[in-house]
Image (cartoon, helix red, strand yellow):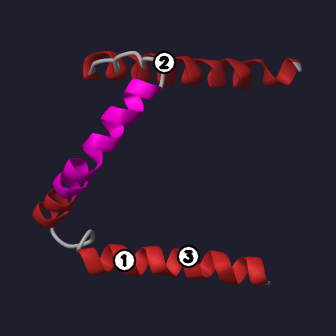
Amino acid sequence: MLKFGVKSALLGSAVYYTIDKGVWKDSATTAAIYDELEKGMSPYVGELKSQVPYELPALPSNDRISYLFKYYWNCSVKATFRFLVELPTH
């Protein structure tokens, strides 16, 4: 019960803090908060990047992600219907 109470208190304080800072207001306020957070974190992130020897690959472009999503969606639909067609023989 204590564990649940601690988790609830942490969640409640996180929600209260985000409401107090204005995260849930209009998008302009949220964008300003994001810019402020990014400016505050950039020195630490740069320092952390220099300490970590692993370099992350670049993210795929939106066109590539869209293509892959459609491709795998179609593959899953085909596999589902292939399973349904062959269901009586299983």
Q: Earlier in the sequence, mark 3 or mark 2?
A: 3
Q: Is residue 82 magenta?
A: no
Left or right: 23 as drawn, with respect to 4? left
Disc on the earlier residue, 1 or 2: 1
Q: Secondary structure at mark 3?
A: helix
At a point 40% along the width and 15% down the height, the residue shown is 57
Q: Name the side, left or right, on which 75 lies relative to 71.
A: right
Q: Quadrant of residue 23?
A: bottom left
Prevailing secondary structure class for the magenta stretch in the rendered image? helix
Provide residue 73's location: percent of width, then percent of height.
49, 24
Q: From the image, state whether disc 3 or disc 2 is nearer to you.
A: 2
Image vertical order of residue 26 relative to residue 31, above or below: below
Q: Secondary structure at mark 1?
A: helix
**Which mark, residue 17?**
1
* Identity, as a three-letter code, of the amino acid under mark 2: Tyr
Residue 39 part of the magenta-drawn span:
yes
Q: Residues within 10 Å of mark 2 (few under 14, many from 20)?
A: few
Q: Secondary structure at mark 2?
A: loop
* Residue 49 placement (x, y as % from top left): 39, 28
| Furthest residue toward right | 90
User: Which quarter of the figure has residue 85?
Assistant: top right
Residue closer to the observer: 42 or 27: 42
Three-letter code for the amino acid on which mark 3 is drawn: Leu
Label number found at residue 54: 2
- Identify the magenta region: 34-51
Vertical relation: 14 (above or below) 30? below
